[in-house]
Amino acid sequence: MHYTEGNLCAEDRALRHVACSKVRTALCSIETKWTTLLDSLVNQLSARPSLNFNLDMLLQYVETHPQLRSENAEVARYTTAFPEFSDAASAALDRIRSRARRQLERALEPREYQHRFRFTKGLS
């Protein structure tokens, strides 16, 4: 980092601006890919209802999917180089994870309901 009498140099500000835009772009890409992967996963699970699953296991699968590797590496690289971005990036990733969890829970809720009450008879 280039400091001159306590002020940040223009080069450092430019680097921070580039890093911030790269992190923002990577987080948007991560969110888009998470949504696409979750939609694909829900379609596969609804096509094969006999599969057993665990919600946390499915989220872990999506989180470690190879399509997300480059964006996750980019976010990690810039947040280690500029630690002031780490809080915002981790908060954004937590938001993406919680949104994905809610989306997956809503999509799989009818299936869970059917599984839970599969042995009950109707009220007729």
Image (cartoon, grey):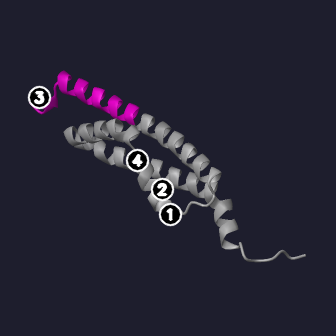
- Identify the residue shown where x is 47% and y is 38%: 33
Left or right, 5 with reference to 40: left
Q: Amino acid at mark 2?
A: Leu
Residue that numbered label 2 is attached to: 58
Residue in the foreground of this view, choosing between 5 and 41: 41
Measured Cα–Cα span from mark 2 to mark 1: 6 Å
| Start-end of magenta stretch | 1-26
Residue that numbered label 4 is attached to: 93
Q: Amino acid at mark 4?
A: Leu
Q: Which mark is residue 54?
A: 1
CB atoms at circles 3 and 2 under 8 Å apart? no
**How many residues crowd around disc 2 within 10 Å: few (fewer than 14), some, or many (20 or more)?**
some
Left or right, 28 with reference to 75: right
**How many residues crowd around disc 1 within 10 Å: few (fewer than 14), some, or many (20 or more)?**
few
Helix, strand or loop status at disc 3: loop
Quarter of the image with the C terminus in it: bottom right
Q: Amino acid at mark 1?
A: Asn
Left or right, 1 with reference to 106: left
Of tags 1 and 4, the one toward the viewer is 1
Helix, strand or loop status at disc 1: loop
Q: Which mark is residue 18?
A: none
Q: Quadrant of residue 74?
A: top left
Measured Cα–Cα span from mark 1 to mark 4: 21 Å
Magenta stretch: includes residue 50: no
Measured Cα–Cα span from mark 3 to mark 2: 45 Å
CB atoms at circles 2 and 1 under 8 Å apart? yes
Helix, strand or loop status at disc 4: helix
